[in-house]
Each structure stands twice: as C-alpha cells, then as structure tokens.
Image: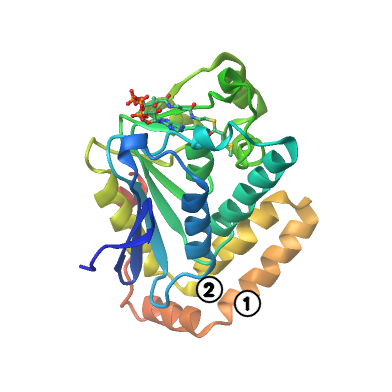
Amino acid sequence: MGTPERLSEHVQLEIREPIAILTLDRPDKRNALDGGTVRALGAFFADPPSGVVAAVLTSSGEHFSAGLDLSELTTTTVIEGVVHSRGWHEQFDKVQLGTIPVVSVLRGAVIGGGLELAIATHIRVAEPSAYYALPEGSRGIFVGGGASMRLPRLIGVHRMADMMLTGRVIDASTGLDLGISQYLVEAGEGLVTAIQLAERIAENSPVTNYAVLQALPRIAEMGPQEGLFVESLMAAISQGSDEAKSLLEEFLSGRAAKVVASEVAR
Ligand code: 1HE
C-alpha cells in the first residue's frame, strides 16, 4: 500500500501501482472545489505518474462535493467569470480526455460543480446516500464546468432543465436508472468497488483503454459513416498491437479468463 501524499491543499494522493487514489479532502467545506483543487486534478490527469494506468477519485467526509467554492464568485467581473469557467473546462477535459480511466466514488452531495467533475470521470460508483442537484438557478448563476455539454448526453436536455429550473434533487437509485452512475452499491462499499474496477481496468491492453478514452467519445459525436470509418481505423490499430496479439493467443490456447455471466449481470 502506498503512502498518502498531498497533491494540493485539498487533494490527497495515494499511489498503489498500477492505480492511483485521489481524495477530495476538504470535508469541513463539503469538498467545495476551489481553483487550486481543480487545477491540481487537471495537472495530475494531464501527466499521470509512470506506472499508474487507472485512477480512483473519492472524497473525505460524507459528501463527494458541494460544487464550486461559492466564495470565489463574490467579486468576479463578467470577463473573470468567463475565464474561470473556461479554466474548469480545460481541467475537466484533462480528466475526461486524458490517458487513464478514472472511477469516481459518489456519496452524499454531488452538487453543481461536483456533479460536473463526476461526469467528467469515466465510471461512477454511487452509494445510496448520493444525491445529484444543480442549484445554480437558486444562486443566480449558470453551470460553468461543462454540465451543459456533458449532462444532456447522459440524461437529456429536458431532465437537466428540470434540475436547474425547479431545483429537483435526484436520488442515487434514480441516478443509476438515468445513467448518472453506472453502479449503485451498498453503503460503505463504494471505495472498495471502485478500487476493484480500477484494478480490473488496469489489466486491459493500454491500447484498448486509450481507444475507449480517446476514440469512443469522439466517434459518438461524429456522423454515422465518419464514425464507422474511424472505428475501423482504431480497430486495426488496436489489433496490430503486441498486447492484442498476445492476449488473443492466450485465449486461443485456453489460458485466458472467459466471460462470466454473473460478472456481466452485476
Ligand atoms: C461551502 C459550499 C460551497 C458548503 N462553497 N462553501 N453549490 C451549492 O449551492 C451547494 C451549497 N452547499 C449546500 O447546499 C450544503 O452545504 C450541503 C447540502 C452540500 C451540505 O450541507 P451541510 O448541512 O452538511 O453543511 P453546511 O453547514 O451547509 O456547510 C458546511 C460548511 O461548508 C459551511 O461553512 P462554515 O464555514 O459555515 O462551516 C458552508 O458555507 C461550506 N460550504 N458548500 C463554499 N459550495 C463551475 S460552475 C459550478 C457552479 C456550482 O457548483 S453552483 C453549486 C454550488
């Protein structure tokens, strides 16, 4: 087990190769996200340590994150507001479009910018306490960390509009049904499940993981024929890798794990 260190004032980092565990660590402020935290996360995922091929993003205390540190907004001008929001876009793009898959653990409040961070991660494991909200409407602001781009792709424009206009809070079970999380586990099981998933992801060929992070979201945004063509290119690139050749050979010689129905049904 690695020794935890500080990535920044409010982010703890533990390396357990081949995975890294990042912890939002500002429980007294419900893990509200200040600029230093957002920049530290972006910098980590833009250039992860060698030997780390998957990550878990979790939190201290009862909540994942109460969103933007609202104390940062009280004196901003319009142009500073644009720059602030564009900074979040840049850093969260480094999470989503980086090179290592990120599994997040969602508990308690996953609000505003906290939800924006969560949906920039690739796999979200929720505990029953998780709840999702966009209270920007009641604060007189708009989302600024990518929610209007990422969230409608998960739940649809009209559900997001409902959350913003009425302040509707979505519970963990509904969040699972809508795809906000892909997993819903028992209370206290989120971190252990996320670590298991990250370790499983780390066993994949790096080419496949890279393709899932880089090619898949782009293909999903393309026209059908362009997307199919890029899929073929990515398929050929991955098939040509040394990892693919040895993994296929392992299967054909009966040495590889088979697909197990109970794992798939989870
Ligand atoms: C904060 C923040 C914050 C808590 N920025 N300081 N997000 C919100 O509008 C959500 C605001 N927060 C809440 O609704 C509640 O704090 C919670 C439901 C998350 C938790 O409630 P509770 O009763 O456990 O804690 P609390 O007493 O409200 O908060 C504890 C402390 O954290 C308190 O500070 P203290 O000095 O009085 O102890 C709170 O002020 C502080 N705190 N949340 C700053 N968000 C890129 S655009 C993204 C736009 C958004 O994210 S908008 C949504 C913002």
**Residue 34 vs residue 151, the one in the foreground:** 34
**In what element is the residue under mark 1?**
helix
Residue 244 against residue 129 in the figure, above or below? below
Callout 2: few (<14), some (14-19), or many (20+) C-alpha neighbours within 10 Å? some
Front position in the image: 134 or 222: 134
Kindly identify the residue that appears in the image at 44 percent across and 49 percent down: 123
Please indicate, yes or no, whether residue 218 appears anywhere in the rendered image.
yes
Mark 2 element type = helix
The C terminus, quarter of image: top left
Q: Residue sitting at 53 percent across and 17 percent down?
A: 167
Q: Residue at x 49, y 52 (%)?
A: 36
Q: Is mark 1 within 8 Å of ligand 1?
A: no
Residue reaching furthest top?
166
Q: Position of residue 147 (x, y in %)?
A: 61, 37
Q: Quadrant of ligand 1?
A: top left
Percent x, y of residue 221: 72, 50
Percent of width and height locating residue 53:
42, 69
Q: Which residue is mark 2?
A: 207
Q: Please state which amino acid type lies under the numbered disc 1.
A: Ile
Pointer 2 with pointer 1, Cβ within 8 A: yes
Whether residue 52 sits left or right of residue 47 in the image: it is left
Location of residue 4 by image quarter: bottom left
Horizontally, residue 54 falls left or right of residue 157, namely left
